[in-house]
Image (cartoon, rainbow, N blue to C red):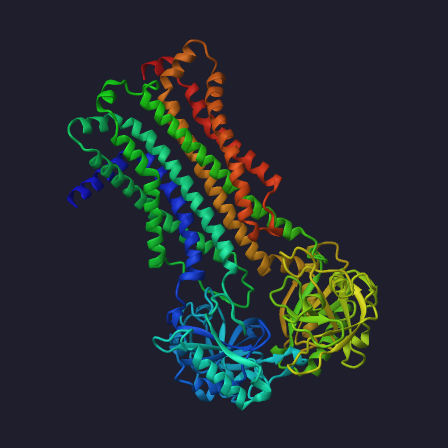
Amino acid sequence: MSTFLQDVRFGLRLLRRQPGFSAIAVVVLALGIGVNTSAFSILNTLLLKPRTGHVDAELAGLYSRHRTRADAYRSFSWAEFAALRERTDLFRSLSAHGMGLLGLREGDATRRVFADIISANFFETFGVRPVLGRAFSREEEAPGADIPVVILSYGLWARMGGSPDVLGQTLTLNTRPFTVVGVAPRGFGGSMVMVTPEVWVPTGVYDSVTFDDRNEGQAVQLASPDYRGLIVVARLAPGATIASLAPGLDVVSRQMSEADPAGSADYELELAPLSRLSVSTRPQTDDELTSFMSVLLGLAAVVLLIASFNLANMVLARGRARSREFAIRSAIGGSRRRLVRQLLTEHLVLAGLGGAAGLGLSSLALRFLLVQMPAAMPISVAVDTTPDARVLGATAVFAALAVLMFGLGPAWRFARLDPMRELRDQTGDASSRTWLRWFSTRDALMTAQLALTFVMLTAAGLFVRGSMQAARTDPGFTLDRGLIANLDTTFVNDTPEQSRDFYARALDGLRALPGVTSAGLASHLPFGEFESATNVQRPGPPLHADAPGAADGLVSATIASVSRDYFATMGIALVAGRDFTAAESASPGGEPVAIIDETLARKLFGTTNAVGELIQSSPRTEGAAPPVLRVVGVVGGVRSDLFMREPGAFLYFPFGQQPTSNAYLHARTNAPSADAETAMLPGVRAMLAGLAARPPIVALETRPMFRERNLLLAVVRTGAAIFVAFGVAALFLAAVGVYGVKAYLVARRTREIGVRIALGAEPRDVVWMVLREGLVLVSVGLVIGAGLSVLTGLGMRAVTFQGQAFDLVVVAAAAVTLLAAMLLASWIPARRATRVAPTQALRA
C-alpha cells in the first residue's frame, strides 16, 4: 500500500508538471466516460433501478385472461377485486387502480392532468407512505362514497410551493374542490418509472370523475358487476413467486367461474411481472426498449473506445519523451513489473480525474434532456439525476476499462525497452528501430480511431436524417397552418346532452369568426398522445383475432368521431361518396353510417367501390351485438404516428352518433401568415368564454405550436440530440487525437523541417508533406469505417425511420466532415512548424 501511495503521489506530481497533457487527457476521458455514464444512467432509470417502494420481485400484475382466445384480456370489476383482496393466502396485499385525465384548475386556465384512481391500500401495496399526510381510507375508497380528497405528486406539490401547510387546502378538479390529504414520495409513479401521475384520487369518486366514451359519455357505475374498469396489482407474500402461486390461482379461477358462470366462465387469472413503462389490462414487457438501449450502449462504447485509442496515442507520444527515464530505471534494477505498476497507477489517477469529470458531465447532460420534454404534458417526469450506487459503480468500471485500453499496452511496451539502446541513441532520432515501431502503432491506433468516428457520424446521421424525413413526410394533412382548440366537457361535468349542445354552439361560433373559412370537430388528433382502435370486418359472425381466417377478414382501425366539414378543414381529400350531414353530426338518430379511409377500404373490399357497403365493428360493451354501419364515403389516408411507414386504417363515425367528452375543434383560416393565425387565438378564446362561464379549454394553439410541443416529436428530437451528441463527441475526440499526435510528431521533427527549409524547401511543401501523411491515414480509416458503418446501419434498423440501414447522403456527409476535420487538425501544427526560423530549428 505504501508503494501504491508513493506511485499515486508521483503520478500527481507528474500531472502537475505537465498541465497541458493532463488537461487534454482529463477532457478526453471525461467525454468518453461521461457519454457511457449518461447511457447507463438512462438504462438504469428505465430498466434497472428499483421502483420507489419495495423491490420489483415482490410485485406482479394480476390479469383476467380468456381461456381460449389468445391475447384476450379484460379489466376487473369492483366485486371481483374485493373478493380477490380477501385471499390473504395468496397475496400479502392487493390493490386496484384506473387511469384517467382530469381538469386541474390553475388560475383562470384548466390544465389536463394524469390521475390515478386508486383503492385505499395502493400505497401500502407498493410499500410506500406519503411524505406528508396520509393515504386514503376504506371509507373513501367505497364505490359511490364520493368523498372529494386528493393526494398530490411530489412534483406538483413542489410546483405549488412545497409547503407542509398544503394539507387541508383545496384543489379544483373538473370544477369540483378536492381536499388535499397527502403528498406522494419523490419519484413515486406506482408501477411506472420516470413518469408519475399528477394526482391520486380514491375509487370512491370514480363515478363522478370518469366518463365512458364507449357509452356516449355516460358516467360509469363502479359498483355495477357488469362494469370492469380496474387494473389490479399484487404484492406477493414473502418467499412466494409467480410460478408458485399458479396452482392457487387456478383454484380461485374455478371458484369465480362457479359463482358467476355467465360472466367469468371463460376467463382465468394470471400473474405476470409488471411493466416499468406502461399500465395495461394485459401483461406488457419492456422489450421495446431493447433495440434502442442496445444501439445507445453500443455507440457509447464506441465513444469510449475512441477516447481510449486517442489517449493511448498521447501516452505513446509522451512515453517517447520519458524513454530515457524508463531506461535508467531499468538499468539500476527496476523490474518490468514495477515499471508497469508505476505507469498503470499514473493512468489510474488520470482515469479517476476523468471519471469524476465525466460523472458531472453526465449529470448536466441528463438535466438538459429533461428540459427538452414538453411542459404541456399531462404527466410529471420524475428523474433523479443524482448518481446512485449503480451509476457510480458503472462509472468506475468505465474508468477501469479505459485504463486497460489506453494504458496497459503502452505500459508493457515501455517496460520492455532495451536500456543500453535507449541510453546510447540520440533523443528524438526518428530513424531508430524502436521509434519506427512506435510510429506504426500510433498509425494503427489513429486509423482505428478514425474508422470508429466514421461509424459514429454515420449512425448519428442515419437517426437524425431519418427523424427529419419522418417529420417532413406528408401525414395526409398539414401541420403548418390552422387553429386547434382541445376541449373536454368532463372538466365541467356536463351531461352527454349538454356536451353535444356545447360542441354544436362552439362549432357555429368558430365558423362565424372573421378569417375562418371552415371548421370541424373530431375526437382524435393525429400525432396526439391518445387514440382508440377497434376491429372492423364485413357483416357476419364476429371474428376474433386468433380465429382461423381472421387475418384475411378482420382489420384493426383507429376510430374517430368527426363532424361535417372536418375533412375539408384538415385538408383530407374526399375520394368517393359524401361527407357527413349536419343532422348526422349533431344528433344520435338516423341510420348508423361511417366514412372509411382508402387503407381500410382496400383491406376490406379490395378494388371494389366501398361506398354503400356494410361493415361491422367490435361492440363497445361485452356481450352486445356488433354495430353494423353503412359506408357513405371514402377519404384519403392519414398517418397518426410519426414513424408509420404508410397511412393506417381509419374508421370515422359522425359525432352525433358517437359523441365523446374530449374533442378537438379545428379551424382553417385565410390569414396571410402563421403569426397572423396566432393573433386570432384570443378571439377564439373569447368566443368560447361567451358560451360558458368556465369554458373547458385544455389547449388553444396553432398547428405549428402543437407541432413544437408534440410529445412524439419531442421524443424524436431528444433521441436525435443524444445521437448527435455522441457523434460530435467522437469527432471532437478524433480531431484532438490527430492534432495532438501530429503536433507532437511535427515538434519532434522540427530539426528535420529546419534543414528542409534551409536547403530551399517551400513552406507549402512541408505542409503538404504533413497533410499527405494525415490524408493516407484518413483514407484508410474511411475505407474501414465504411464497411463498419454498413454493419452498424443494419443493427440500427429497428430505431431508424422506415428501417433504413444505408443512406448515401449520410455516408458522404460523414466522410466529408471527418476528412475536413482531420486535415484541419493536421494543417494547424504543420503550418506552425513552417514559421520557425531555420537557424532556431537547427539549434533546437
* Residue 166 in view, yes or no: no
Q: Position of residue 830 (x, y in %)?
A: 44, 23
Quarter where residue 582 is shown:
bottom right
Q: Position of residue 810 (x, y in %)?
A: 59, 41
Q: Position of residue 710 (x, y in %)?
A: 60, 60
The C terminus: image quadrant: top left
Nearer to us in this view, 738 or 245: 245
Residue placed at 79% from the left, 76% from the top? 584
Determine whether, in the image, residue 378 is placed left or right of residue 417. right
Determine whether, in the image, residue 205 is placed left or right of residue 534. left
Say how many tags the image has: 0
* Residue 134 in view, yes or no: yes
Nearer to us in this view, 9 or 455: 455
Nearer to us in this view, 198 or 265: 265
Q: Position of residue 336 (x, y in %)?
A: 22, 33
Determine whether, in the image, residue 8 is placed left or right of residue 520. left
Above or below, comparing residue 427 to residue 259 in the picture: above
Nearer to us in this view, 723 or 569: 723
Residue placed at 51% from the left, 54% from the top? 292
Residue farthest toward the bottom in the current orientation of the protein: 259
Residue placed at 44% from the left, 43% from the top? 303
